[in-house]
Image (spheres, helix red, strand yellow):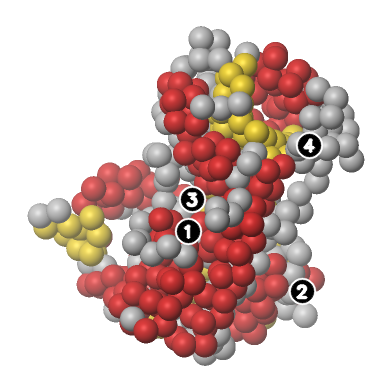
Amino acid sequence: MQYKAVVIGSSAGGLNALKSVLPLIPAGFPAAIFVVQHISPDSDNYMARFLNQRSKIHVKEADDKEKIEVGTAYIAPPNYHLLVEEDFTLSLSVDEKINYSRPSIDITFETAAYAYGSQLVGIVLTGANTDGAFGLLTIKNYGGYTIVQQPSEAESSIMPSEAIRLVKPHKILKLNDLVMKLLEPGFILPK
Amino acid sequence: MRKNQEEINEIQNIEIELLLEALYRRYGYDFRDYSRAHVKRRILNRLASSQLKTISNLQGKMLYDKQYFESLIRDLSINVTEMFRDPAFYRLIRKEVIPVLKTYPFLKIWHAGCATGEEVYSFAIILKEEGLYNRTQIYATDFNRDVIETARRGIYSIENIKNYTAKYQKAGGKFSFSDYYLAKYDSAILNQSLKANIVFAEHNLVTDSVFAEVNMVVCRNVLIYFNRDLQNKVLKLFDDSLIKGGFLGLGTKETIMFSNIASKYTCINPKEKIFKKKIS
């Protein structure tokens, strides 16, 4: 199977993890990336700017009804859920918090699974709650590929451990190996 | 025979289109141009928590059972709101909008999609503190009768008051937030005087038309639930309601930039999404 999009969920310790992952993705990466990092509702778009400065791909905060482009990483804005539409645009919502979180990882994972089906890669990284596990299970049920960060390497192991328990993912990997997997020839559908 | 998930997904998308069509034709509520991801997620959640097997079953039940239809409407509506949500928005209202509004002898303000009313009362408090309330008529509308009723009552959970008090202050509140409510058991009852000039009414942005000429439209975090076409249509409705020189206040992630009305407005603040209709 060749994949078309990657969705990443992270919480406590996530910014450091993302800082080790996104800068390793080469320019022209042929898939779109969606990132949900739990973040204070009052923060500005610092994280997107910070990661963009360090990355070769374009990293930006997701805008409502924005058209999805490959080679771009879209960050869920603080205090909004990020939804992936099946016409490959993005929507934002202010729905109730899910797992005490807005943005919630589950909601982005689920809607990305509806849109990309078996052509989606779901990744759960470090975190101190259980958001993302259910969404990752949805991705697996839709035939997508599932990866969880090695809990022993994660700054906070609760989220990866819960995802592993619930989903039994295809791979449990350290951050470096996880990037290598994404960059494996033929893993992502070439443009 | 077990179908694979991609096949099921394809079938469910057909079922959702039919369900929305049925909902519209039977009851007049039109969700066909809502964000499909939002609608689908809500419907699948409803399905998962029911005894029903498919969305088609759910459609049948909805058509025949009015109560079930009403619970479905509650699922699909967006009723998350809070007082002084985004305090910076209200600070900007005080600084940039109020001085202009003060030049009118009489004002009309429309809160469209007001849900349970928290933001309407927030705005009413600002108007009071700025000495404008007595010459303002506020229309607060939503398509959902239940939430309008809640808005009209103006009674909220005491649990939220701490958060609202902090936000009131951040929004530039001039007095004490406790001046505006009466705590009783686990409720905060907003002062009657805040309601004097507010008319609460049912109005559906998707299917109803202009009902008044207004100086300002406030519609925050509603448009994000619509697709581009519907956003455009609703923005046209707001434009038709607004006087020249009137203001449009949207949510922080909403914009008129990609709509047909963009050229008729100037943006007062790119972050807080307050727009002013040009005079000519």
Q: Residue furthest left?
A: B185
Helix, strand or loop under label 2: loop
Q: Picture coordinates of residue B190 (x, y %)?
A: 24, 64
Q: Nearer the viewer, mark 2 or mark 1?
A: 1
Question: Residue at position x 84%, y 29% from top?
Answer: A186
Q: Nearer the viewer, residue A161 or B99?
A: A161
Q: Earlier in the sequence, mark 2 or mark 1?
A: 1
Helix, strand or loop under label 1: helix
Q: Is residue A111 above or below residue B126?
A: above
Residue behind mark 4: A2
Q: Picture coordinates of residue A34 (x, y %)?
A: 67, 39
Question: Residue at position x 28%, y 52% from top?
Answer: B177
For label 1, the crowd category at 10 Å Cα-Cα, with few meaning under 14, some 14 to 19 and many 20 or more, is some
Residue behind mark 2: B260
Q: Picture coordinates of residue B196 (x, y %)?
A: 29, 79
Helix, strand or loop under label 3: loop
Q: Are marks 2 and 1 in contact (CB under 8 Å)?
A: no
Q: Nearer the viewer, mark 4 or mark 1?
A: 4
For label 4, the crowd category at 10 Å Cα-Cα, with few meaning under 14, some 14 to 19 and many 20 or more, is some
Q: Is residue B279 above or below residue B91?
A: below
Residue behind mark 3: B86
Instruction: Please state which amino acid type lies under the numbered disc 2.
Output: Asn
Q: Which mark is residue B44?
A: 1
Question: Residue at position x 39%, y 47% from top?
Answer: B167
| Alpha-carbon span between mark 4 and mark 3 | 42 Å
Have a look at marks 2 and 1 and say if they share a chain.
yes
Question: Residue at position x 44%, y 25% from top?
Answer: A165
Instruction: Please state which amino acid type lies under the numbered disc 1.
Output: Leu
